[in-house]
Amino acid sequence: MDLQGIEGRRSAATGVNQLRVDTKGGLMAHNYSGKYAEAALAGRMFVVASQSAVTTTKDNDTTWTGLGVGNPIGSGKNLIMHEFGWALIIVGSDDGLVGLASCAIGTDFTNSLTQRNCKWGGGPSVAYCDAGATIEAPILERVCGTHGMGATTTEMSKPPNIVDLAGSIVLPPGRAIVTWTSEIVTSGLQFHFVWEEVDA
């Protein structure tokens, strides 16, 4: 059986059932130049970052602080988490772990931080992004790395730390993902999340 492909960007609106290939005839598994570029160009990708160093809470404290992304009930979207990152910008107040916990969004999880569409000029996100809230039943889902009492130039806490979540966490309406540390870090960590929004 022969397969036909076309080179370069194309629109599904053309109605032509052809595969995309590169300039050497190799099958293109995704569009454009990066794995997130197609979603970003479509205006489905969003990012939020701590604008200054935050103080984190310990373990599964329900009076939580850090950085979180929540999907409000009734949003009509699923949030596909693609990337998480953090940096320790001072000597840490204690040695511990950095992770991600999931939880119910909670009634006071608000949109206190500004998230951005990865396509400049793109539409707004449905997500709530917060730096502190009362959360419900947090459960640690990912251990992502460590923070420590060494100087920021040491390997233990050398920034930045990027975790490719690769779409492995999906938040339906009513769920949130929040930063988690095993020990309190006082005004020392900055975080970011990158996610995609698709119809639920």
Image (cartoon, rainbow, N blue to C red):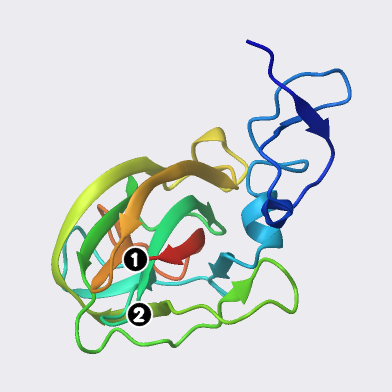
Q: Extreme right residue here?
A: 23
**In the foreground, 132 or 115:** 115
- Residue in the foreground of this view, choosing between 79 and 65: 79
Amino acid, disc 1? Ala
Dot 1 or dot 2, earlier in sequence: 2
Q: Which of 133 and 170 lies nearest the eye of the viewer?
A: 170
In the drawing, does residue 123 fall left or right of residue 178? Answer: right
- Kindly indicate the quadrant of the structure image that contains residue 112: bottom left
Rendered image: mark on residue 25: none
| Residue 75, numbered circle | 2
**Which image quadrant: the C terminus?**
bottom left
Q: Which residue extends farthest left? A: 137
Which residue: 66% across, 59% down? 40
Q: Secondary structure at mark 1?
A: loop
Give the numbered dot on residue 200.
1
Nearest-to-viewer mark from 1 and 2: 1
Q: Residue at horizontal 63%, vertical 30%?
A: 29
| Rendered-image quadrant of the N terminus | top right
Q: Residue at x 25, y 52 (%)?
A: 182
Measuring 57% from the left and 59% from the top, which residue is drawn there?
89
Above or below for 65 versus 188: below
Q: Residue 41 in the image: x percent, y percent?
A: 71, 60
Residue 189 visible in this rendered orientation of the protein:
no
Q: Nearer the viewer, residue 185 or 131?
A: 131
Label 1 crowd (10 A; few <14 / some 14-19 / many >=20): few
Q: Quadrant of residue 114?
A: bottom right
Q: Secondary structure at mark 2?
A: loop
Q: Position of residue 111 (x, y in %)?
A: 42, 86
Mark 2 neighbour class, 10 Å CA radius: few under 14, some 14 to 19, many 20 or more: some
Is residue 48 in view from this perspective?
A: yes
User: Do residues under tags 1 and 2 come within 8 Å of each other at their CB atoms?
Assistant: yes
Disc 2 residue type (three-letter): Ser
